[in-house]
Every structure is written in C-alpha cells, then in structure tokens.
Image (cartoon, grey):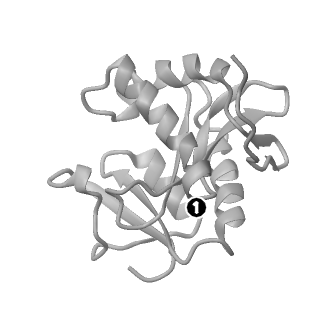
Amino acid sequence: MTAATLHIPTLETGRLRLRAPTRADFEAYEAFMLSPRSHLADATPRKVWHLFATEFFGWCLEGAGHWIIERKDGTAIGVTGISHPSYYPEPEMGWALYDGYEGHGYATEAARAARDWARDRLASLVSYTHSSNARSVAVAERLGARRDDDAARPDAAAGEPVLVYRHWGPA
C-alpha cells in the first residue's frame, strides 16, 4: 500500500524534532494510550487506533494536527499538537510523553514549538487537562497559559474534572 502525500511541517528545537507520524509510530502510541497514565477512559485497541487517526487527520481538515515528538537521536518519545474535533469548543493543544521520558522538560519544549507554530494561525488556543494530572498542569503553566474556569469544556468531558488553560484568545 502506498501512503498518501500530505505536507506536515517538521519543527526543530534544541533537542527535539516534531515530525509527521508513520504507521510504525502506532505501537508506542498504543502502549501509552492503553496504560493507566493516559487517562483515556475505557480504552481499547480499536479506540486507540481511531484516536491516533483523528489526532493526525486534523492536518487534512484543519491544516493543523499532531506531531510525533522525536529526540534528535531518532527515538520517538511522545506526541504534541493541535486538535479541534467537533466536540471541542476551541482548538486545543495537547501533549503526552511515553513512559520513561517525563521529567526532562521534553513536553514543555515540544509544546512550546507547537504553540509558537500555531500563534499566527489560530484565533484562540486552549489546553484541556485532567485536574489530577499535575505534570500536565505544570507544562501548561510553564508555557504561560492561564487557567480559565469560565471556558466551555468539551462535550466528552461533561461532569469530569477537566481544567482549561488558555494560551490566547477569547473564550
């Protein structure tokens, strides 16, 4: 099978490369998403495949999506990027690091590159995070995002303890 061609920009930071996904990236993504660290309720391999496709399909529909976070040595260590599915009130920037890569500043470095790329492309940008995810809250705050308790939450998060961190733009 031949892959379709789609331009997804590659972003570089001091230690990282944010690049387009490949089919080979799915195994590590799936392992993370099926782990308790992902906060993905009722995860199944089928749901994880659909989430993987959705996160990257945004490039086709919106001109923005997710990247694989890769260290300069070629090791894929997580994902970051922009999502705006129909059930999100605003474009959302998210990040996730695979097991063993937390605590090195990678999430902040990668998310900063994604945020800076999106700055002139989006009127608003938020990050949704589970209230118990202290590491994700810390990343949002290191990026300068402000907690917005008045912002609308995604439909899928109704009744769940989701915090909204606003990077810019009106609610």
Figure quadrant of the N terminus: top right
State the image coordinates of residue 44 (x, y, percent, origin top left): 32, 20
Q: Is residue 70 left or right of residue 79?
A: right
> Which quadrant holds residue 120?
bottom right
Figure quadrant of the C terminus: bottom left
Q: Is residue 166 above or below residue 95?
A: below
| Three-letter amino acid code of the residue under disc 1 | Arg
State the image coordinates of residue 89 (x, y, percent, origin top left): 35, 66
Q: Quick one: 88 or 151, which is closer to the camera?
A: 88
Q: Is residue 118 left or right of residue 57?
A: right
Q: What's the residue at 37%, 45% (across, down)?
A: 133
Q: What's the residue at 69%, 27% (across, down)?
A: 76
Q: Is residue 151 left or right of residue 37?
A: left
Secondary structure of the residue carrying numbered label 1? helix
**Residue at which label 1 appears:** 142
Q: Residues within 10 Å of mark 1 (few under 14, many from 20)?
A: few
Q: What's the residue at 64%, 21% (across, down)?
A: 23
How many marks can you see?
1
State the image coordinates of residue 40 (x, y, percent, origin top left): 33, 33
In the rendered image, the residue lying farthest to the bottom is: 170
Q: Is residue 132 above or below residue 25?
A: below
Q: What's the residue at 24%, 27% (across, down)?
A: 42
